[in-house]
């Protein structure tokens, strides 16, 4: 064996294991969801001042997760793994593997997170270990506890916002320039080709994209049910950001209202990260649209259709 090799031998691989416990002033179901919903996960994962331009999570046993952390100097730190156990909202076990820029593993790890309800709050216990697979990765292990501590502090900040139980956040990276994606969102002739979950069609009755302007549309379900919707634009900042109030639902049923913010961020040449952030008046309203209307899955399918449309 080459003694100068940068790859650590199996008998000399540095390892580190840590356990951290935190109490969160939030329901257990909400804390658990922050670990498996990509849009929420991206808001707190990683040390302070780091962002996560890529955050993907296929939350099922055997499903993969992948995050690219970006440091304040622009350096990317990819990581990912596979879910081994998912017991909502009690326990989560996943492999945790850091890679270099070429996708080669440099740290092999396993993380177990447990969630225990305590008087309306949530006691979270994180147990994680890491093994350096290359010599220089041993330095990263030294910062493992500080990094996880800062991540869990950011998770505290997420719940401190006071809206976490009233939010739905959905993101997708679209393989198209931001200006093109913006036009697809604000041009009624284009919106009708992709808006809504799969199997739905849309009729746009009015779309006046300016602050105070009205957007009225009817979504037609595959079973023939109509879903009238009305939006009032509050902010229009081309091509970065759209904010509107929304009221709608199944025809004949009580309307549900929300405020939605769409952001369009260039994450690489010709690629745009689209984020939908909806805030509902109450947690019960959020539950209504999630359970009765399938809002989370519907939102994901809507962004999938947008991605497919703009890449044609």
Image: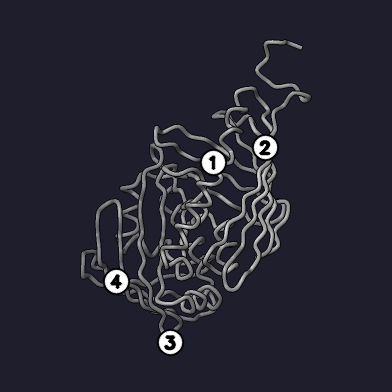
Mark 2 is surrounded, within 10 Å at the Cα level, by few (under 14), some (14 to 19) or many (20 or more) other residues, namely many
Mark 1 is surrounded, within 10 Å at the Cα level, by few (under 14), some (14 to 19) or many (20 or more) other residues, namely few
The image position of residue 241, as x and y in percent, is: 30, 56
Residue located beneath label 4 in the image: 215
Query: Which mark is first along the chain, 4 or 2?
Result: 2
CB under 8 Å between discs 4 and 1? no
Query: Which mark is first along the chain, 3 or 1?
Result: 1
From the viewer's perspective, is residue 152 above or below residue 215?
above
Query: Which mark is first along the chain, 3 or 4?
Result: 4
**In screen coordinates, is 122 left or right of 280?**
right
- Front position in the image: 275 or 133: 133
| Secondary-structure class at tag 2 | strand
Residue 130 is tagged as 2
| Secondary-structure class at tag 3 | loop
Q: Quadrant of residue 141?
A: top right
Residue located beneath label 3 in the image: 254
Residue 146 is tagged as 1
From the viewer's perspective, is residue 228 above or below residue 262?
below
- Front position in the image: 88 or 236: 88
Q: CA distance from mark 4 to mark 3?
A: 19 Å
Farthest residue to the bottom: give it: 252
| Secondary-structure class at tag 4 | strand
């Amino acid at each position: 064996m080459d003694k100068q090799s940068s790859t650590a031998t199996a008998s000399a691989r540095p390892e580190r294991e840590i356990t951290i416990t935190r109490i969160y002033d939030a329901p257990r179901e909400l804390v658990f969801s922050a670990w498996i919903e990509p849009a929420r996960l991206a808001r707190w994962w990683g040390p302070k001042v780091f962002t996560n331009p890529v955050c993907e999570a296929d939350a099922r046993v055997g499903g993969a997760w992948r995050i690219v952390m970006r440091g304040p100097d622009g350096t990317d730190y990819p990581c990912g793994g596979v879910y081994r156990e998912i017991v909502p909202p009690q326990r989560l076990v996943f492999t945790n593997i850091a890679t270099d820029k070429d996708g080669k593993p440099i740290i092999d790890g396993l993380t177990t997170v447990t969630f225990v309800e305590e008087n309306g709050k949530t006691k979270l216990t994180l147990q994680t270990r890491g093994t350096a697979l290359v010599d220089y990765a041993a330095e990263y292990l030294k910062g493992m506890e500080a990094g996880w501590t800062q991540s869990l502090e950011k998770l505290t900040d997420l719940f401190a916002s006071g809206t976490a139980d009233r939010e739905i956040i959905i993101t997708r990276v679209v393989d198209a320039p931001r200006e093109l994606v913006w036009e697809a969102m604000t041009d009624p002739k284009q919106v009708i080709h992709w808006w809504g979950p799969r199997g739905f069609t849309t009729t746009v009755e009015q779309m006046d994209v300016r602050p105070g302007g009205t957007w009225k549309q009817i979504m037609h379900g595959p079973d023939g049910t109509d879903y009238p919707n009305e939006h009032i634009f509050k902010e229009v900042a081309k091509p970065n950001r759209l904010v509107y109030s929304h009221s709608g639902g199944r025809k004949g049923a009580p309307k549900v209202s929300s405020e939605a913010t769409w952001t369009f961020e260039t994450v690489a040449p010709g690629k745009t990260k689209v984020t939908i952030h909806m805030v509902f008046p109450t947690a019960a309203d959020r539950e209504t649209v999630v359970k009765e209307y399938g809002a989370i899955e519907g939102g994901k399918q809507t962004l999938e259709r947008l991605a497919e449309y703009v890449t044609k």
